[in-house]
Amino acid sequence: MSRGMLETIVPEPAFTSAATTLDPRLTLETPLVLQSGEALAPVTVAYQTYGALNADRSNCVLVCHALTMDQYVSGAHPVTGKPGWWSDLVGPGKAIDTERFFVVCANVLGGCMGSTGPKELNPASGRPWGLKFPVITIRDMVQVQVKLLNHLGVDKLFCVIGGSMGAMQVLEWASRYPERVFAAVPIAGSYRHSAQNIAFHEVGRQAIMADPEWRHGAYLEENKIPRRGLAVARMAAHITYMSEAALHQKFGRRFQDRDAPTYGFDADFQVESYLRHQGSTFVDRFDANSYLYITRAMDYFDLAAENGGVLANAFAGTPVRFCLISFSSDWLFPTSESRAIAHALNAVAANVSFVEIESDKGHDAFLLDEPEFHQTLQGFIDGAATIRGLPRRGSHTP
Amino acid sequence: MSRGMLETIVPEPAFTSAATTLDPRLTLETPLVLQSGEALAPVTVAYQTYGALNADRSNCVLVCHALTMDQYVSGAHPVTGKPGWWSDLVGPGKAIDTERFFVVCANVLGGCMGSTGPKELNPASGRPWGLKFPVITIRDMVQVQVKLLNHLGVDKLFCVIGGSMGAMQVLEWASRYPERVFAAVPIAGSYRHSAQNIAFHEVGRQAIMADPEWRHGAYLEENKIPRRGLAVARMAAHITYMSEAALHQKFGRRFQDRDAPTYGFDADFQVESYLRHQGSTFVDRFDANSYLYITRAMDYFDLAAENGGVLANAFAGTPVRFCLISFSSDWLFPTSESRAIAHALNAVAANVSFVEIESDKGHDAFLLDEPEFHQTLQGFIDGAATIRGLPRRGSHTP
């Protein structure tokens, strides 16, 4: 394996294993034509890489992040100081082994961790984009990732993987760029956002827009933040990430720091206190307008509608190896959604394995230490790596 | 049957079959000692009656309403003009036949349709109660209903029935006043509010409190209404009342008045438009502080905790005949909750029947025209009426 080639392409500190605030960034000056028809320029992509690209550039794993996640997959997060969101899965010796694979993760278009989004400056006005930012889609996010990988010298991904909104990007990749994907792992995802999920998103957006500090999207210009609206949006969403069983086991009806009810509107119950905490900490790390744009991108995602109403058409003749994973207690992206994808892939005789993991942790399970999930992933990746001709685990020469 | 006796007790227009804005009201001057220990006086109860009390006062059905419902069970609602919320079930010849039964429904304590609640005047200040109103519980609501029935001359109910929060009141009645209840029908209910349900309520409350127009609860004094916060609360709650399947069948991903997405934040999808409508119309008929107090009352409900942690203790030796009804697609108060009640009742050898109705309409099914539900209810009520010695259907002499 050689690191030399890549070092000339990717600016430092792309090769440090821990994420830092000094993201490598790529700026695309050529206007990006969005799915809406609008053109956007320039487009900056903030990303992180872990591990090294091998000589034949065949070991790249693209990780696609979920709604409120970012490019800090592994190592310490520069804002929160907490471990990256998939540190359990991505790192030396982990299922996505950074000693074997060159792992890339980019903050999505529309995000708020360095990539172009509504909180960045609109070059036309010199002020934050706000609601002047064009509505973007999952396809647009993937378009930008394609350009990033071109820049990194990766023609074909060994694997594209992600959970939740990440799974949508994985499906978009496999559907639109099948020749550039060897293996695809959509986890806890769907091929189209359901009416119920659109409804939950709409509640969150309305909560943000109802906050007078939102200022019709221009809060940054006025030094305001719609803290309360964004916190309410997060609270509502957070309930959907957990199963009823997980909430019951974690909190039940236990009181917070008291033995009896106060008969008031304080957070008497632990679950209230927990939700309020989730809401208030979210505000410190996420931009309200990004929340609007990214939820909207998910709402618009419908891979069947874009293929004449027949999902299988999205994958006709696909050479991609798929591994679909769902979680039994996930009610936001239930197993039935993954099963529908599996049926479509079966209809085009694709190479697909589909595993429902027994878990009581709900949608969040894809972010948690779930041994059966990790083993499933490990098995699929090892198998695919062998077929791809990549060295076995532990055989790397650092 | 004689109507004479009751006419001296209940003010007009209690005997009209259609609800009117001229509710009969009862005012209790003696302070009501609440579960919190606080005393509340005076307490006014706004209620509706349908049909007539028979000579031996044995045909009274008390209907307990849910969170956002009111005393207008049947006939036209005086505010919305729509049919009462259980018009399909309550009326001449219906399952709860107002030609056989004397049906009573009272606006709950803490409500906003005439009963004492946070929007009524605090006699100490001459201003609306607002947050000075004491926190109330399901037990307090039932206490008030007991006093109303005393006033109406009803010692023993033929039946107490209700769905959702109404079911909580039914269980409270059966547990605390078993000698005053012949039959009890808790529908789509629970013996204690779950962590997930507390969480959803907390989101709604935070949405209301986040609205600056809420004014720390004093909005009525300042001629404001927290419209946006209350609408968001209603939107979030409304999702929980419907099943994923019902949302999918009703709206799917269909666009509202357009053929293609607008790539914006308008209500592109029908489900968004529907939710916004639900939110905005709710504000016209419901008080934001009442929403806070009533959701809180539900949160505090835990019939097991109040009986040494053993639900069966709440019903030891009960003479009450129970009919438990749940709906297969109700994920807010799932069948497992009703089953737990059935188990507790079985443990004390109570007379209980338990039916899960197959329905794809979610929690709202108890308000909808579900034939199997109506037949089940009809069968139970007819059987119980026979045992109670009430005349058969159609044998009344008006």
Image (spheres, coloured by chain):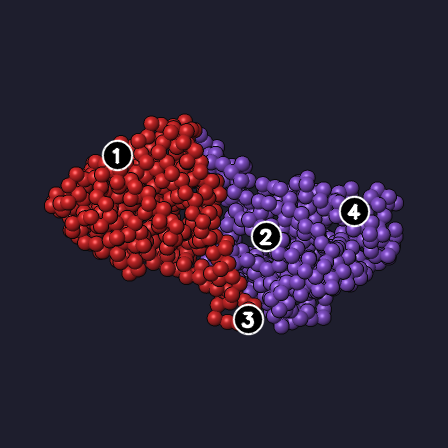
Chain colours: A red, B purple
The residue identified by callout 2 is: B336
Q: Which residue is drawn at 31% across and 51% down?
A: A89
Q: Which mark is residue A260?
A: 3
The residue identified by callout 4 is: B382
Residue neighbourhood size for the residue with mark 4, other residues' Cα within 10 Å, grouped as few (<14), some (14–19), many (≥20)? some
Nearest to the eye among marks 4 and 2: give it: 2
The residue identified by callout 1 is: A180
Give the left or right position of residue B143, taking residue B288 as reference. right
Which label's residue is closer to the chain start, 4 or 2? 2
State the separation of the CA atoms marked 4 and 2: 27 Å
* Chain name for mark 3: A
Secondary structure beneath label 3: loop
- Residues under numbered marks 1 and 4 in contact, where contact means CB atoms less than 8 Å apart: no
State the separation of the CA atoms marked 3 and 1: 60 Å
Q: Which residue is drawn at 81% across and 47% down?
A: B100
Labels 2 and 1 positioned on one and the same chain: no
* Chain name for mark 4: B
Give the left or right position of residue A81, taking residue B286 as reference. left
Q: Residue at x 30, y 31 (%)?
A: A319
Residue A336, compared with residue B145, is above or below; it is: above
